[in-house]
């Protein structure tokens, strides 16, 4: 787990603000779900045979005896909220977005942390293929707005329960004849969830998978038509994509379209996908709601931050204060606190160093910040109701009544 220090906060905020602007434009409403949920939600929603549930969840028993989990993924929580708050009765589709920390006990590696941040977009209540395309478009646009170049979309269809069962039989038959070539995890996956073998990152397994039957060749008519339409939408929007026939994603709830977005460079491929998601038409019903189709995806904030830093994305610097308030003595400190608040209400940025008593040290700080003006308030000035206004470049000084200083500085700063 990690801290996000001040020098990286500007990237964090830029990503969040960009996502918010796009969410507002496309009509997504913000939702925040709890960081801790019932463990059953993720076991049932994400899939008992997934790596997330078997190896990566932080689960524990509360004092009250509840078995809970730090959320590893956003979609099950969104679906739970959709059902619990009766969103099925709202005009469909319901478009939601979220951001926040998530938790997975993964092996630490570049760009991957055990506490990480996701920004997710979900559309519930619509089966039309245009929804898949819009979700992809949203994440592509966020990355483009963040000045990330060489973006590529990897996309596949994993069908639905009708055509996938036949494909699983073909895949298992192929893999069983080569079981000895698979890693120990994949030999276990072959029995529990054979599609997960396609997602393995081990080179030996990748080699076996490269010759395996492809789901895209065994889609039913409905899934085939759906996927064809998604690709046509991407073509119309001129979004760059590759067909990735062994892409399945590591979650059990996906149906039909799945996708991941990468920076298409050697370094970008090593780091992994920047965003990913797909359609999940069975999840709402699985978690106790009606049969509601849905589609969504999430972006890994830390990974995107790393790319922005690596490629040298420049962010606008926050405007530095042009005024510094220096004070001398206890009485002037008391007056300065009130005066400082008046500057805040007037929306005039102003710097200070209330903990310093020496005028020399305060002027040194003002000079280092690069302000245009320093206001000097001593005991004498407090009694007389005045303040000294010093131009830093020329050293020229004048006295101004304290109750007029806000107006005086507003005029000077406008010039």
Image (cartoon, rainbow, N blue to C red):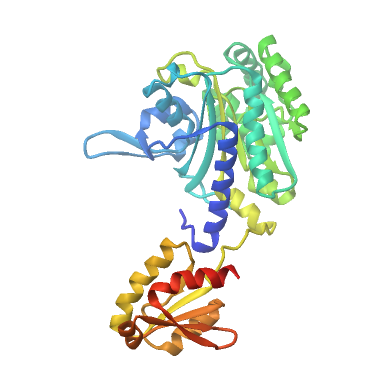
Left or right: where 274 falls relative to 245: left
How many callouts does the rendering have?
0
For the point 70% across and 51% down, the residue is: 267
For residue 164, which quarter of the picture?
A: top right
Which residue is at the far left?
64
- Is the residue 160 above or below the residue 361 in the image? above
Left or right: where 415 falls relative to 332: right
- Is the residue 301 above or below the residue 86 in the image? below
Looking at the picture, how far across and down is residue 8, in whole percent?
Answer: 54, 59
For the point 60% across and 25% down, the residue is: 195
Between 202 and 367, which is closer to the camera in this rendering?
367
Looking at the picture, how far across and down is residue 75, in whole percent?
Answer: 48, 31
For residue 401, which quarter of the picture?
A: bottom left
Q: Is residue 1 visible?
A: yes
For the point 37% across and 23% down, the residue is: 84
Between 365 and 159, which is closer to the camera in this rendering?
365
Looking at the picture, how far across and down is residue 226, in whole percent?
Answer: 68, 17
Q: Is residue 180 visible?
A: no
Left or right: where 382 falls relative to 26: left
Looking at the picture, how far across and down is residue 161, in whole percent?
Answer: 57, 14
Image quadrant holding the C terminus, namely bottom right
Between 379 and 138, which is closer to the camera in this rendering?
379
For the point 45% across and 53% down, the residue is: 1
- Is the residue 309 above or below the residue 129 in the image? below
């Amino acid at each position: 787990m990690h801290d996000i220090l001040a020098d990286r906060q500007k990237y964090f905020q830029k990503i969040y603000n960009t996502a918010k602007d796009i969410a507002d434009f496309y009509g997504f409403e913000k939702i925040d779900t709890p960081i801790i949920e019932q463990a059953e939600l993720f076991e049932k929603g994400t899939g008992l045979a997934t790596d997330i549930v078997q190896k990566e969840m932080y689960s524990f028993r509360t004092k009250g005896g509840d078995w809970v989990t730090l959320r590893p993924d956003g979609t099950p929580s969104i679906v739970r909220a959709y059902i619990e708050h009766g969103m099925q009765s709202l005009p469909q589709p319901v478009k939601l977005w979220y951001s926040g920390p998530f938790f997975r006990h993964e092996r630490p590696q570049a760009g991957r942390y055990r506490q990480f941040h996701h920004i997710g977009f979900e559309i519930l209540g619509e089966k039309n293929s245009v929804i898949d395309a819009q979700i992809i478009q949203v994440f592509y646009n966020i990355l483009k707005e963040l000045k990330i170049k060489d973006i590529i979309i990897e996309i596949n269809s994993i069908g639905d329960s009708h055509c996938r069962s036949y494909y699983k039989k073909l895949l298992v038959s192929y893999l069983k004849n080569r079981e000895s070539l698979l890693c120990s995890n994949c030999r276990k996956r072959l029995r529990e969830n054979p599609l997960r073998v396609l997602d393995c990152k081990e080179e030996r397994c990748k080699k076996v998978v490269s010759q395996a039957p492809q789901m895209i060749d065994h889609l039913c008519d409905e899934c085939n038509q759906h996927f064809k339409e998604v690709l046509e939408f991407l073509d119309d929007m001129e979004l760059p994509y590759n067909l990735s026939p062994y892409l399945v994603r590591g979650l059990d709830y996906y149906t039909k379209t799945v996708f991941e977005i990468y920076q298409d460079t050697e370094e970008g491929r090593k780091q992994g996908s920047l965003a990913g998601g797909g359609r999940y038409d069975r999840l709402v019903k699985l978690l106790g709601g009606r049969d509601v189709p849905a589609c969504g995806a999430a972006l890994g904030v830390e990974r995107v931050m790393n790319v922005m830093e690596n490629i040298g994305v420049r962010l606008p610097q926050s405007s530095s204060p042009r005024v510094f308030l220096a004070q001398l003595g206890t009485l002037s400190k008391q007056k300065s606190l009130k005066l400082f608040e008046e500057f805040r209400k007037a929306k005039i940025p102003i710097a200070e160093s209330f903990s310093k008593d020496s005028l020399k040290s305060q002027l040194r700080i003002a000079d280092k910040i690069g302000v245009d003006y320093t206001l000097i308030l001593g005991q004498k000035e407090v009694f007389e109701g005045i303040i000294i206004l010093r131009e830093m470049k020329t050293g020229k000084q004048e006295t101004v009544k304290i109750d007029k200083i806000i107006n005086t500085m507003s005029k000077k700063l406008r010039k």
